[in-house]
Image (cartoon, rainbow, N blue to C red):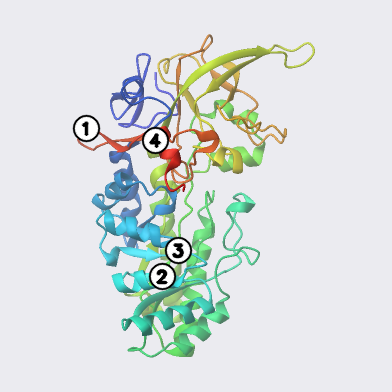
Amino acid sequence: MRFDWEIDGFLTAKGDDLLIDGVRSSDLADEFGTPLFVFSERRISENIQNLISASDDGGPKIKVCYASKANSNLAVLRAVNEAGGDIEVNSGGELFKALHAGFEPSQIIFNGTSKDEREIREAIEAGIYSIQADSVSEIELIEQVASAVGKPANVSLRLVPEIRTDTLHGLQTALLTSKFGMMPDEAVAAFGRWKDPVGPIRLKGIHIHLGSQNPSPEPYARALEALYREARTIFEKTGTKLEHFNIGGGFPVNYLRDRSHSSMLNGAQAALFSANFDRSSALRDGWKRVLEKAESEGFDDLLSDVELVTEPGRSIIADAGICLTTIRHTKTRPAGPDTTPDRWLLTDAGFNILLSMETYKWYYHIVAAARASEAHDTPYRLAGPLCDGGDVYFDIEGGKRLPDHRLLPEGIGQSDLLALLNCGAYSIAQMFPYNGRPLPAVVMIGSDGNISLARKRDEYKDLLRNEV
């Protein structure tokens, strides 16, 4: 029997066990303890290769820059690099880690709204592919730093195109109400102002990022069209031909491959979490649409040598990561008059290591790791270990943004192991030691099947680090 949450060759149920790249999840928990994050190098590579394939069959020359903000663990970064991916960073710290992980400067783009002088200087000195300027004032600061360093800066400009998608409001980044990007007319003026080919600023391209978990490919086609229109305007007014377009990332992950909980979510939320389309086909089809338009207008030469940059994060790492957690305690309490009492399962994984579960009420499917092949048809309420009323796996405000209950095998209880799927993105990147809880270990299962420790489990003494 095959389960909808399974991923061929990576995540499977065999007998009673949940296997991750052929390794029993219970063996991993026994060896490394819980909570524990487990990542698959092979799955990361598959996700990278899917996007690189957008170059096939008339697709654009593509540069896949993994968004390291989604997960900047060094083992993950090295897996991305070895799979042929490049990288996007958002801080001096992420730049430092990218270089430490072995990325060449030509593989690195640097995003962000509030870069300081030190970060800009480090990016210029490294000679990275592009610093993505978010405002005119940032270009001016880059110019000052580049002049002081005595080395030119490769720069691209982030635009705000007012393209709305059907994702959550907090994940929309291409609207005028967001904090990101500059207006298109500001970008055109910038290309006129910084035209000197031997000056400290070398403007190379333009950038649009739509946000995250976008459920439809159509906004990407519209963004490509917007990039082309802007490139044409820049060429007509300044004579500059761009070297790259950056379409951003935000490609969705299907968190509801298993639909057993979909009826417990409202329609919009279920649609968001089940979003799924072929990313490489979406980019290829959108590019062909833009090529046809450019050819009809006589500007196809503007696209002949353009490199299309993407910044996928969630779609590379989310389904490559699993969190293993142990049920530490159980309880039963009345759910209301004439209703079946609620059975509670209290785990060792709270929102301090899965922050999106609280900030965005994010859904992660749960499987009983040592009873994976059994029917998951009994409702339970789940909560983490934190002394915080919001540390629950449901929506306490009753907004139906998460299921009230999770379905697991009958009789599951204390010491049983659970696996939260699809939680490789924005989990360990955002975790923090709330309530004095040491942060968990992380392991990587290599493409060769070898298991390596990617992050040691914190000890109590780590809670004192940097305190005076």
Q: First in sequence: mark 4 or mark 3? A: 3
Query: Can you say which quadrant of the picture contains the N terminus?
Result: top left
Report the number of discs: 4
Q: Is mark 2 on a helix, strand or loop?
A: helix
Labelled disc at residue 458: 4
From the image, state whether disc 4 or disc 3 is nearer to you.
Answer: 4
Q: Distance between the residues labelled 4 and 2?
A: 30 Å
Tag 3 residue: 247
Q: Is residue 293 above or below residue 16?
A: below
The reply to whether the C-beta atoms of the residues labelled 4 and 2 are less than 8 Å apart is no
Labelled disc at residue 118: 2
Q: How far apart are marks 1 and 2 (CA)?
A: 39 Å
Give the image location of residue 364, x and y in percent: 51, 33
Q: What residue is at 43 percent from the left and 24 percent from the top?
A: 3
The reply to whether the C-beta atoms of the residues labelled 1 and 3 are less than 8 Å apart is no
Residue type at numbered disc 2? Arg
Labelled disc at residue 450: 1
Nearest to the observer: residue 160 or residue 133: 133
Q: Distance between the residues labelled 4 and 3?
A: 38 Å
Give the image location of residue 388, x and y in percent: 63, 32
Q: Can residue 454 be seen in this view?
A: yes
Q: Is residue 193 above or below residue 347?
A: below
Q: What element carries label 4?
A: loop
